[in-house]
Image (cartoon, rainbow, N blue to C red):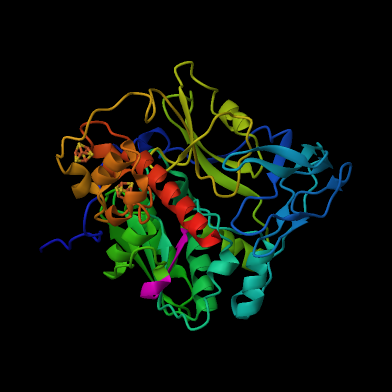
Amino acid sequence: MPSIPLRTFGHGGIHPPSRKEHTADRPIEPIEPPPPEVWLPLEQHIGAPAIPLVKKGDRVIRGQRVANGGEGGVPIHATITGKVKPIDKRPHPTLVTSESIVIARADDGEELEFPEDPGWRSLGREECLERIREAGIVGLGGAAFPTYRKLTLPPGVAVDTLIVNGAECEPYLTSDYRLMLSAPAEIVEGALAMARILGLGRVLIGVEVDKARALDALRQAAAAAPRDGAAVEVVPCEVRYPQGAERQLVTALTGRVIPPRALPFAVKVLVQNVATASAVHDAIRYRKPLLDRVVTVSGDGVFEPRNVRAPIGTLLGRLVDFCGGVHPRATRLIAGGPMMGRALPRLDLPLIKGMNGLLLLVGRGPFEQGYQACIQCGRCLEACPLGLEPDQVSIRVEAARALETEPFGALDCYECGCCTYVCPSERPLLQFMQVAKSTLRRAGALRIKT
Ligand code: SF4
Ligand code: SF4
């Protein structure tokens, strides 16, 4: 029988070494001992900062709300039981600093309970959205966009398909993979709940085909789910980076192409990550807030790579200690994956809701190793999934002509790093794209002001 071709996107993409073998066979482990302190930044999501409800000296219990959501934002909850220290500015992984609620742990183990609501499957749309908002859920694939807002479509917009993203295509990262193995029913039920909110009959869960156990687990969970909801299809995709980027996954699973700079609902699709789907299930069924997250700690710069479940706000140094500590050869620290992640300067930073990976790598980073002139080989053009021209952008940025880069796609780049990966001249093309993009945006903002 001829084999059915695996789903994938059209142009570009690369096949970097997966490096997932470090952690793929390690089940999710809760951090032990629990962190002595957590820092909860009031800015962990897109939207206004949260507004504290507690003050220095207050006792708080794990699960208790400690900050209300600001406009368009979500609340924050105590992730350990203990005493509030002064609320002040602390280092933040993406914002340099942020006002943060710091909690010092008490050893009594008290925490709020979240019993099941027996009527959870028949709740109305508004009640479900409210529970998701109250639980403080944001996109856990890294975007940190409040989930209740993403599920509230703008007037006149309708979608016909929910895609659940299990295509964890970044090298090293296996936190979603291990979650698909340990909580497939929660992911499927969370997806069905979101389909009910959106009034949809179709859910597609995209998983790369090298995650065969996850595909099986999700298929079994989908088969066991109630029959009265949306149809759930678990779809194997080709192993190809960046298969897990929203645009590429939408094309792979539906054949639809999202226009440049548009969102998936431009083609009637909404995408949610598997970890977000699981958190949505917990919020609707148990009213359980988002208290912990699973994070892959990996790379040659850490002694014992692991998938760790840790309270949000745990300091990254504690995570690394739990994973055997920093290897003397480690030279780089990255939040997220090596392709799209963000370099971090230090370990005294808190684990935030949107952080799915912490990598300690060996070797030099972009711009540190030097690079050569463009030889016009065209490999970056072949690799770019959006068909942009990073070679032309880089040449113009080098010549201090970044304002001329828009026709070559600088504003459309979503920083997947494929171009940098293939360049034989080792040109840091992604970083050139970032420079061009921010220059164009600043110039645009100045134009609007004048
Ligand atoms: S980083 Fe930007 S320019 Fe480079 S391949 Fe990705 S989308 Fe294309
Ligand atoms: S891959 Fe590098 S050398 Fe080749 S065209 Fe692109 S920028 Fe130039």
Q: Position of residue 432 (x, y in %)?
A: 35, 40
Does residue 16 appear in this view?
Answer: no
Q: Is residue 115 above or below residue 122?
A: above
Q: Quadrant of residue 433?
A: top left
Q: Position of residue 141 (x, y in %)?
A: 48, 53
Quadrant where the N terminus is found in the figure:
bottom left
Whether 11 is among the magenta residues is: no
In this rendering, position of residue 363 left or right of residue 143:
left
Taking the spot 26% from the left edge, 69% from the top edge, the residue there is: 255
In this rendering, position of residue 327 left or right of residue 246:
right
Work out which residue is located at the far front of the displayed protein and give it: 450
Q: Is residue 394 above or below residue 130?
A: above
Q: Position of residue 251 (x, y in %)?
A: 29, 65
Taking the spot 54% from the left edge, 60% from the top edge, the residue there is: 450
Q: Position of residue 324 (x, y in %)?
A: 54, 24
Q: Is residue 5 above or below residue 227?
A: above
Q: Nearer the viewer, residue 422 or 185?
A: 422
Work out which residue is located at the far top of the displayed protein and give it: 328
Does residue 60 appear in this view?
Answer: yes
Please provide the residue range marked out in magenta.
265-273
Work out which residue is located at the far right of the displayed protein and give it: 57
Q: Nearer the viewer, residue 433 or 204?
A: 433
Q: How many marks?
A: 0
Taking the spot 28% from the left edge, 36% from the top edge, the residue there is: 17
Work out which residue is located at the far bottom of the displayed protein and give it: 156
Q: Nearer the viewer, residue 178 or 247?
A: 247
Q: Is residue 206 above or below residue 314?
A: below
